[in-house]
Amino acid sequence: MTEVIKRSEFFSSYIQSYDANLYIKVRTEIQRKNFLLPLVPSDIFLFDASQDTSILESYSRLKYLAPDHYSQHIVAVNGTSSKLFKAATTSFMQFFALNIYADYAIDNAFELPTSTKALKHYRFRLLETKDTLNFRLFRISFTPRFTSSSLLNGEMWVVDEVFNIYEMEAKGYMDFIDYSFHVTYGENFEDYLLPQKIAVSARMGIAFNVIKNDYQAELSYVDVDRNYKYHQPKHQKGYDLSSLFLIQGDSLNIVKDQSYWNRIRKDSVSQEETDLLTASNIEALGKQDSAFMKEPFSIKQMTGFLTSSSFYNYKFVQLKYSGLLNPGLLGYSAMDGFTYKQQLRLSRAFKRDRHILFTPEIGYASKPKQLFYTVPIEWLFWPEHMGKVQLTVGNKNRTYTSQHNEKKSASGHIDSIPSYPSRTDYFRDDYGDLTAGFEIANGLLLEAGVTYHLRTSSGKYPSAGDSTHYERQKYRSFSPKIRLTYTPGQYYRRIGYRKIYLSSRWPTFSVEYARSIKGVFRSNLDYERIEGDIQQSLNFGLTNMFAYRLSAGYITNAKTVYFADFNYFAKNYFPPSWEHRIGGSFAILDSYWYNASNAYFQLHAMLETRLFSIYFPSKLSRYMLRERFYFGQLITPVIHSYTEIGYGLGNRIANAGVFVGFDGLRYYGVGFRIAFELFNNP
């Protein structure tokens, strides 16, 4: 194995690229089901709830450029269920462009036994030696030295003297999915590093339902670029990755002609499966689906509609609804209590990939007893350069004037302000925002716009003309703003006319300036706001990710009373994902302190690792996909030092974290947060 690992860098770069024809057959089986099956998102696992057994096959042209870097053009599909066609094209695709000589595979989900650290993380054992007419083979098993979902169990056949892998079979787990794959390589010298057949099996057990997917893939090569000297893959010469990670087809070309498929298949389809494919009538299935949609909802359909996201597509209009009782939109924290929101997404596409997007949200937080709403509408008018105009109407966290903050926050201690102060002191904050932006250069975005706030006091004050008449005090602000965001080395992809940013090896830098102008549209506030932000996520090895965020802001030139309304330091009761839901913000800091000072400096850091699996039994640790350590630091003129540390565990079902806060060196408090993820399908 030492010799195999020594040669892994050469082997992984020897095949620079190839063009191949790819045939994939998928068999899906629902081995156990109950009334909860409609709740299982079909984008996590491939299945048709109306069929216990489904068969699907596709024929594609595959261009491979590097591990996990490929394009797939779908030529034809065939199957017993029309519902699976689009989903099947992407499922487990990375297994079919796998380079087993790389350190990591499948988006760094697991470490291969050929990695540079394999001898530290795996145990190897020689099982047998076999002599053939042309070469000698060693059968070697590999097992993890410690329990981790990043490591595999399996066997491989290694060729003597050359020390390449002729065949590998491995299995592992991820959350509630057990999977295995079997790769066979060519026997002759020209093909000995090219995969010929790949079999993938995955079994998901969730909510007392068991679903199994079996994939079989066969590749035939049209053109192969081989190099004896290592050089960087071609795609790294530029930032445009439009030809990579891409799965496309002009349309899903359904071919039922069995003679066509018989010319493509080799030995992947059994007679039983052939009979099923021959007997199926896709046009009839489509009619059945249409008739099915006209029928009244059954209990199962209604349950799925209420508790998980629903998606509808009609011509150029797409509609997605989050589900009235979707548990994925429910969260809890000791500071905010229960939070729940509803989401709607409506889009209309036009020529050249222009579109209008309408995404209203409404949510409620139980402890502050506040209802939040956001109603944005966006017009993407220049998709080639991410040019868009967005109008948003909504409300924000309750806020306080600078005069109130100066009186209440003089002590500089966090516990000097109780949680959720008297309703007579705070101001309700409703706003409208109009912003336009576009890309100046790759990675460099310019945005400009204006924000109008109407802040209304919950208390009542005597009017100037009549002391017996009371009215609510109001503040209005009209604030033009400009924001510049830059990410060096920004990789991107183009789909049609639309440009989509991917990742970068560098941080993202942002700076924003806003000025509230007195006298415009009855504005009675005059001050300036300046903010800057730096953030980055770094993926590496078994310790999967390290992320940080550094930001600061300052209210200056205040000629009137002002409101500390920062963008990068703001209370968010409904963060959109696990990364923001648990980390990236302060978990137990009272909402008052987000608007209590004219300046702030904050640092957030998060380390994702998998140490949990080393210390806990495998039956428990296998379900812990994410383990994270958090650190947060805040400095303001009224809070000299607030520190928060936390620890979290999570998987695809739910995520939870516990956090401890310190006011300087004084203990401030402890709290926890929990969020459900399974049914929250973006």
Image: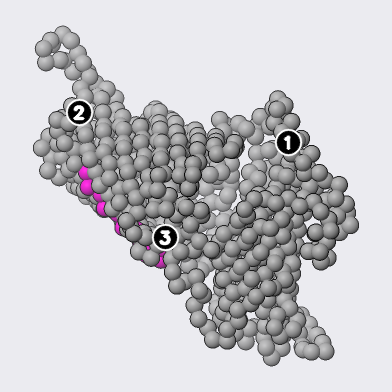
Asked whether 9 or 147 is in front, the reply is 9
Residue 351 horizontal/vertical position (percent): 49, 44
Q: Is residue 184 above or below residue 278?
A: below
Q: State the CA–CA distance, disc 3 to disc 1.
A: 43 Å
Q: If you read the primary sequence from the N terminus, does the residue marked by circle 1 or circle 2 appear first?
A: 1
**In the image, what residue occupies the spot 83% across and 89% down?**
133
Magenta stretch: includes residue 513: yes
Note whether 508 is above or below 413 in the view shown: below
Q: Residue furthest front?
A: 351
Residue denoted by label 3: 537
Q: Nearer the viewer, mark 3 or mark 2?
A: 2
Say which element carries label 3: strand
Compared to 371, does 611 lie above or below?
A: below
Badge number at residue 289: 1
Dot 3 or dot 2, earlier in sequence: 2
The residue positioned 39% from the left and 53% from the top of the image is 385
Tell which circle, 3 or 1, labels the residue nearer the N-terminal end: 1
Which residue was labeled with disc 2?
521
Question: Taking 84 as reference, is 677 left or right?
Answer: left
Q: Is residue 173 visible?
A: no
